[in-house]
Image (cartoon, rainbow, N blue to C red):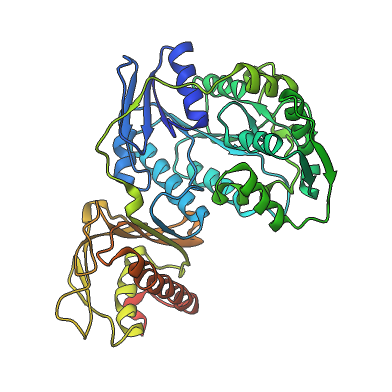
Amino acid sequence: MRIAVTGATGFIGSYLIDYLLKETEHQVVAISRSAMSSDHPRLQCRQADLFSLLDCEKALADCDVGFYLVHSMSPSARLSQGHFKDFDFILADNFAKAAKKNNLQKLIYVSGLIPESDDLSDHLLSRLEVEKTLSSNDVPTVTLRCGIVVGAGGSSFQMVRNLVKRLPIIGLPSWTGSQTQAIYIRDLIKIMGTLIGYDLKHSQSFDLGSPEKVQYFDLLKIVSKELNKRNLYLHLPWIPRALSKLWVTLITGQSRSLVYPLVDSLVHPMVVESERQIPPNLRPDFHSIDVAIHNSIKNDTQPRPPMKKQTSERRAMSLVRSVQRLPYPENWTMKDVARYYNQWLPKFMWPYITAKATKDTVSFGSTLLKKPLLILELSSDRTFPGRQLFYITGGILDGQGPRGRLEFRLGPEKHFFIAAIHNFKPRLPWYIYRYTQALIHAFVMQAFGKRLKSLKGTLPPDSVK
């Protein structure tokens, strides 16, 4: 079979590719944002921007099974406006739609344990939404809900390790008393490999974790023992979560975009629900937490699949991505939304913004200037009922980024839609753009959302006055 692996250079992706090449005869397609190459006869590298549906479709061509191992908590552009859960939705929706178009047999998604709670963190809500999005496009999807994955190279485990290494005295906030069932990376990879041949008729999700239930401060103490550190632990339940997130970020060296959502999730018990356990025929002999941590510190190193990065790749960090989740007016199409936006914006921004629209082109201008500010062209071949896509093709504000585009995309179950700008390259000097055009765009989209909310229950644009 031909197995597609997204996040190929990441933590789980690198272990998975190493396993597939050594333990199976499958062909492997490594999908990454960077341009990679490989001389291995069973490993093919494909570059893809997963924010692009077109790239996703090309990356999954001729594949049988797809592993979805990506998240968007790290910035994907120099300026990323929006919430990570909205970025995550676009990535998952693109992958699911591309998998359906290419007739993949199944998708396998590694997520987090989802506790029974009405007060889930944004991080866990996003994981749950990604699971639903992947499962909503008619390709059977297996979701593996895991606690903390223990393994050399893992960001969560490295965060724990750095706390122990760098702090002789460790204050323990209340969330460190939450229970979890961690899983050793090699146990997880063995399950993922077994699932390739699993007969899946419909989407399912399984909880994964070693049988032991431990508290997070127990993990710290086990790591202390393996590192021969004599840390002093002080229980400080009164420490505000906001403060603990800040000091974890500073001490571990991990990015705020990664640490903050993770710590917000740790207030919930992350344990395996008995009725959601993976079937015995797919279950390995789980390593104990002590052995998993020992191996991850003393014996293991993160595998390096036989891939190398190519030179002369364009830096995505010079570009802009701006994503907003907006209320969806019932019974409207995305074509209705796009048409209404083009009508509403010049009225809202008069006399500073004007708009001229033809069948396939929208030109935004200003009464103060002769030349258009931005020109958008409808991509008819990449547009469908749940999506309107416009390429940014010119204007005095356009710095000609690679495939700069604006899209309106309907969310699952029609509860919301996404308005997103991708790969926009400003022509204005960066710091002028950052504090003028970027802020104006965010303000305009917020106002557009309020306007749409007020139109709930109205007819589509041709009838809206």
Question: Residue at coordinates 76% horizontally, 43% vertically from top-left?
Answer: 269
Placement of 99 over or under 394, stated as above or below: above
Q: Nearer the viewer, residue 433 or 371?
A: 433
* Residue 118 locus on image (x, y percent): 72, 55
> How many numbered discs?
0
The image quadrant where one finds the N terminus is top left
- Whether residue 178 is visible: no
Using the image, determine if residue 128 lies above or below residue 297. below
- On the image, which quarter does residue 146 sit in? top right
Q: Position of residue 338 (x, y in %)?
A: 32, 68
Res 385 quadrant in image: bottom left
Question: Which residue is most to the left?
Answer: 370
Seen from the viewer's position, the closer of residues 179 and 155 is 155
Q: Single out the residue that lies furthest toward the bottom.
A: 351
Instruction: Look at the image and tell me whether residue 100 can be seen.
Output: yes
Above or below residue 396? Residue 282 is above
The answer to whether residue 350 is left or right of residue 298 is: left
Where in the figure is residue 464, as x and y percent of width and height?
A: 37, 81
Quadrant housing residue 459 = bottom left
The C terminus: image quadrant: bottom left
Which residue is at 21% across, 85% downward? Answer: 368
Give the vertical position of 446 relative to 45 (above or below): below
Residue 119: x, y in percent?
A: 71, 56
